[in-house]
Image (cartoon, helix red, strand yellow):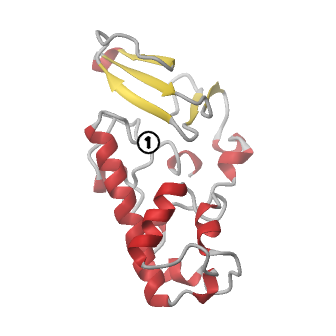
């Protein structure tokens, strides 16, 4: 999130981190590690992380100075058409699940989402990527988008803020309601554009 003061708030959720928009009257929950008061909304942004794998930094950095881990993230699944998605696997010798989990290749999929997507597409996780048919890769692309849509909707229903819910053209508001009103939508891919 870029601020008016020229500082950028970088948030990496890790495996178990959550951003929640809540009323200031809500009592503090266990594993709360960061609070940001949003006076205009009369809400607070709360970061919770049971396992403490996430990171938060307020830094005077421009896009070119984002941490290398952020700069190395690959595109998100919705940034590719199904045809482009399928073509990327054509010459890959890696096992399909390993490739899906490689955040440099494609950002945003973790173990559970990769497993569910492969199951829905009918692809064995140990199969070599280049051996998967174009038709199955089309199905996989659709399954990944479905699984992520469901996860995002479930998180929003629980009051968890979705920070990387971009539609096909990169506009978070096209596919999902804005989780944070105003310009504070999109921390993942949007932070690298």
Residue 163 on image: x %, y %: 43, 42
Residue 127 on image: x %, y %: 60, 80
* SS under mark 1: loop
Which residue shows up at 60% across the image and 28% down it? 52
Above/below status of 55 relative to 97: above
Q: Is residue 51 left or right of residue 143?
A: right
Residue 16 on image: x %, y %: 52, 37
Which residue shows up at 59% across the image and 49% down it? 192
Residue, disc 1:
163
Q: Nearer the viewer, residue 28 or 177?
A: 28
Q: Is residue 174 left or right of residue 187?
A: left
Q: Quadrant of residue 186?
A: top left
Q: Is residue 90 left or right of residue 67?
A: left
Residue 135 on image: x %, y %: 43, 89
Above/below status of 135 relative to 80: below
Residue 192 seen in the figure: yes
């Amino acid at each position: 999130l870029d601020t008016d003061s020229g500082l950028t708030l970088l948030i990496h959720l890790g495996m178990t981190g959550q951003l929640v928009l809540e009323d200031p009257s809500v009592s503090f929950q266990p594993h709360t590690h960061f609070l940001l008061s949003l006076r205009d909304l009369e809400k607070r942004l709360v970061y919770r992380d049971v396992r403490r794998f996430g990171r938060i930094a307020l830094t005077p950095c421009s896009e070119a100075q984002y941490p290398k881990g952020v700069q190395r993230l690959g595109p998100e699944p919705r940034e590719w058409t199904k045809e482009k998605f399928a073509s990327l696997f054509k010459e890959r010798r890696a096992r399909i699940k390993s490739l899906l989990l490689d955040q440099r290749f494609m950002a945003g999929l973790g173990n559970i989402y990769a497993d569910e997507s492969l199951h829905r597409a009918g692809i064995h996780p140990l199969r070599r990527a280049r051996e998967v048919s174009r038709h199955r890769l089309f199905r996989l692309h659709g399954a990944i988008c479905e699984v992520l849509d469901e996860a995002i909707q479930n998180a929003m229903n629980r009051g968890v803020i979705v920070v990387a819910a971009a539609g096909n053209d990169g506009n978070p508001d096209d596919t999902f309601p804005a989780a944070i009103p105003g310009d504070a939508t999109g921390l993942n891919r949007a932070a690298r554009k």
